[in-house]
Amino acid sequence: MRILLVFLSALLFFGCYYDYILEDEKLKQNYLWPDGKVPFSLVGFNDRETSIIFDAMCEWSLASEGKIKFHPILDTKKNKITIIKYSNFGYVGLSSCNGYEDKNEFIVVSVVEKEIILHELGHILGLLHEFQRPDAVVYIDIKLNTMPGFDIFSFCPLDAEYFIYDYKKYPFDYNSIMFSGYERFFVKKDSSILEKIRGLSIIDAWKIQDLYGKDYEKFIH
Ligand SMILES: [Zn+2]
């Protein structure tokens, strides 16, 4: 039971579930949103918060050169992302998937800030935490004294099979939105502090264009 609790705690802390291992390239393509369309609905946000979410969606759409399109829908039978505001949630943000899955998914946020929304949408589109790249230890050190003991597992590098993109193609990205919210837990190898992440990086855009870009048409769902 204790092991199970530790595992569940780890999952919740880093805000996403890794319930798949992708060994086959075609399988990886199945985790891309069909035609780049991401249907969504919002629950519990006021007008100001809704505009922040729309702003974040526009930023991803622009970064993808229009290949990603977020569509608000009311149809409860269609698969979609439900984005929920829950102020008493123990974490600032949580997404239920990394990439497309053939079922309803969700994002829960307790704090509505653009960087948090961008980060969770990044998971939805298929990106993983930059600090969990298999080669992350070459570039960063974890500040062990900044987190409870069991959470160390949430920050460990993942195997390459978890990534739907070829992480080796990209320089390690200290400015990735997939670092946002975790800056204080890491230092660069030269001991310099990681800057607070604001918005998408060039490499975030590069990844999403590669995933949903010119070769996207050949992907089969
Ligand atoms: Zn995350």
Image (cartoon, helix red, strand yellow):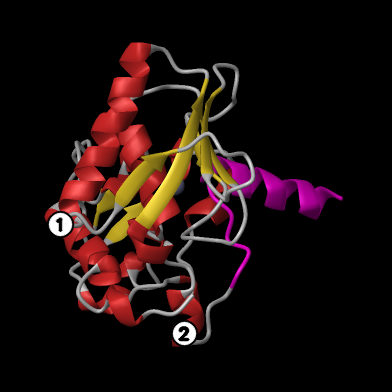
Which labelled disc corresponds to residue 121?
none
Residue 92 magenta-highlighted: no
Instruction: Identify the residue position indicated by label 1 in the image.
Output: 65
Q: Is residue 87 visible from the viewing direction of this image?
A: yes
Q: Which amino acid type is marked by label 1?
A: Glu
Q: In the image, residue 21 lies at what x, y percent?
A: 57, 75
Task: Left or right? Give the position of 67 relative to 159.
Answer: left
Residue receiving disc 2 = 26
Which of the two residues, 133 or 21, is positioned nearer the viewer here? 21
Range shown magenta: 1-20
| Quarter holding residue 140 | bottom left
Which residue shows up at 41% across the image and 43% down it? 120
Can I make out residue 182 in this image? Answer: no
In terms of secondary structure, where does tag 1 sit? loop
Dividing the picture into quadrants, the one containing residue 50 is: top left
Question: Of callouts 1 and 2, which one flags the residue occurring earlier in the amino acid sequence?
Answer: 2
* Image location (x, y in percent) of residue 71: 38, 42
**Image mark count:** 2
